[in-house]
Each structure stands twice: as structure tokens, then as C-alpha cells.
Image (cartoon, helix red, strand yellow):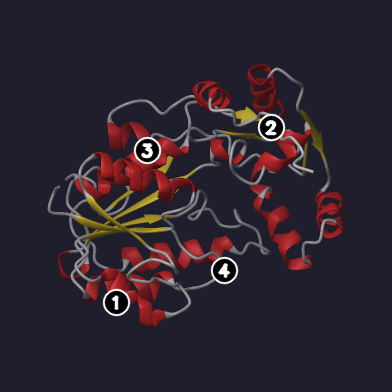
Amino acid sequence: MRDEQILVVGGTGTTGSRVVALLRERGVAVRVASRTGEPRFDWIDRGTWDGALDGVTGVYVVPFDGESLTRPFVERAVARDVGRIVLLSGRGVDVPGYAGEASVAGPTHVDGEDAVRGLGTGTGTGTGSGAGGGGGAGTRWTIVRPAWFAQNFSEGFFLDAVLTGELRLPAGDGAASFVDADDIAAVAVAALTEDGHGGRTYELSGPRALTIAEALAEISGAAGREIRYVPLSPEEFVAELREQGLSAAEAADYAESLSPLRRGLDSHVSDGVRRALGREPRDFHAFVKSAAADGAWRTRRSTN
């Protein structure tokens, strides 16, 4: 095992679980932050933070959406001499009006990035090419801003609808440069374990943009059955979510999260994977092929 001890906040999620796996493959000691773990970690209970951070050399932070807790958590990490902090943020944080007024995650990301950047400037801070890093008490930070996850179709919040054969969204004909979560994790692990990433912000995307209809066409081909995209208005989408039992606030937030896609703000291709890893990002077609081989879109059979 190497000398690092990395705390992964969000270690059971889409990116966090992959970060954990990659770190362990490298022989790095990993602590998965969890309310049931030992030591216990709970975003809401600040009394658990110090125990989780004890002896840690680096932290991967998946923020708690809707709460301004990233800033005090980062401050605690710096106070305990954590050497590296990698923050999972979101695309469009630096674009006024990108997230929309109803966004829950938007303000969380904005405040989180501000907190991390506030640790210090150092050389190489921001999106420049310098290798130094900002940081309080020697802490180096890196921010990753991914586009829409490709895995939303295979294990995220699109999956249930995809399995029914019909995905109904207020996304219009907007396109997104979907990024593979494996690439996000690889960039995060590089920043946690290698030099040259301190003070950098990596915008991550796949190598091309696809509309929802185009993405589903590729999935349909791999799954061997048709999966349709049905475009809805935001009002229709919210009404359907309310019928499914979501609260008005939850439905509005979900609809708002799709508005950048509908407004054509997510189609650009970013170079963060290439900058961080020296290779091209994984294409959506490769993701689809792999997910299909793993049985992601096999229809579920009733257990009744």
C-alpha cells in the first residue's frame, strides 16, 4: 500500500464508487464516507467530520446538493492538514443564468467552488496550465466540472424510464456532450495521487454531442429494442412528476436541471479529460457497448 489515505465523500455514488475502485487498484488506502461507516460521516452532523478526516491526506468531495456545507467542510479539512482536495462541481458554474432560478445544486456548486478557490491562489490557479496549486496550509485543490453523465441512462435517473421503453423529458432537441463517469473518476484519481493538477479546473465532456433521441437510438441498437424519446414542455413534465408523487419543489428542480440542455447550453465539447490524462475521452458508443454487455438495459422481470 502507498502512504496516501484518501477520504471519498460520496463513495457509494456514480463517480465516488469509481474513484474508490481506482484508488484501491493503485494500492491507495481509501476511507469511504458513510453514515454507517467507521468512523461515521454525516454531512448534516458536523461532529462526525473530524473523525472522518483524521489521518487523511486527500479528499474527494461530492457536495450535498441544496446545502452550503462544502465551505465549512473544506475549512475543517485544511485545518487538519489535508494535502489535496478534489471537488466535484458542475458544468455552467461560471455561466450566469445557466442553472436557473429553481436550481438546488447550482448555488451549492457556486459556493463550493468559491470556498475551494479561496484557500489560496498559488501558481497555476484557475484554468491555466501551471502545475502549482492553491491551498491553505499547503492544501492543493482541483475542481472537476463534468457534463451530463452517460451513466444517467444505465444507472442514474433516466434508467427506469429507459427500461419502460419511453423517456419523457423537457429537453427539446438540445444536445449534450455526455461524459463517461469512468473518465470523471480517472481525472479525480489523477488529481488526488499525481503532481501537476493543483489549482486547476477541468471541464469534462465526451468527444461529441448527442441529442436525447440520438443517444436513445444508440442504446436501442445495443439493447435490441426500441426506446423512444418523447419531448415534453416543462409544465407537462412537472405535472407528470407530481402525479408520480414528487413534491412541487422536487419536480421544479428536476425540470430546471434539464433546462440548460433544452436551451442548447450543453452541446460544447470540453478538453478537460485530454488535459488531465493525456488521452481522448471515452465515446458514448463505447459506453453503450459496455453497459449493454453488463446487462444494463435488460428488461426487469416481475418477482410476483
Front of the two marks 4 and 1 = 1
Give the side of residue 294 with respect to residue 175, left or right: left
- Can you say whether 57 is above or below 231 in the image? below
Residue under pointer 1: 50
Front of the two marks 1 and 3 = 1
- Can you say whether 125 is above or below 52 in the image? above
Residue under pointer 2: 212
Nearer the observer, 132 or 65: 65
| Mark 2 or 4, nearer chain start | 4
Give the side of residue 285 with respect to residue 300, left or right: left
Asked where in the image residue 84 lies, by quadrant, the reply is bottom left
- Three-letter amino acid code at the position of disc 4: Gly
| Mark 2 or 1, nearer chain start | 1
| Mark 4 or 3, nearer chain start | 4
Asked where in the image residue 214 lies, by quadrant, the reply is top right
- Three-letter amino acid code at the position of disc 3: Gly
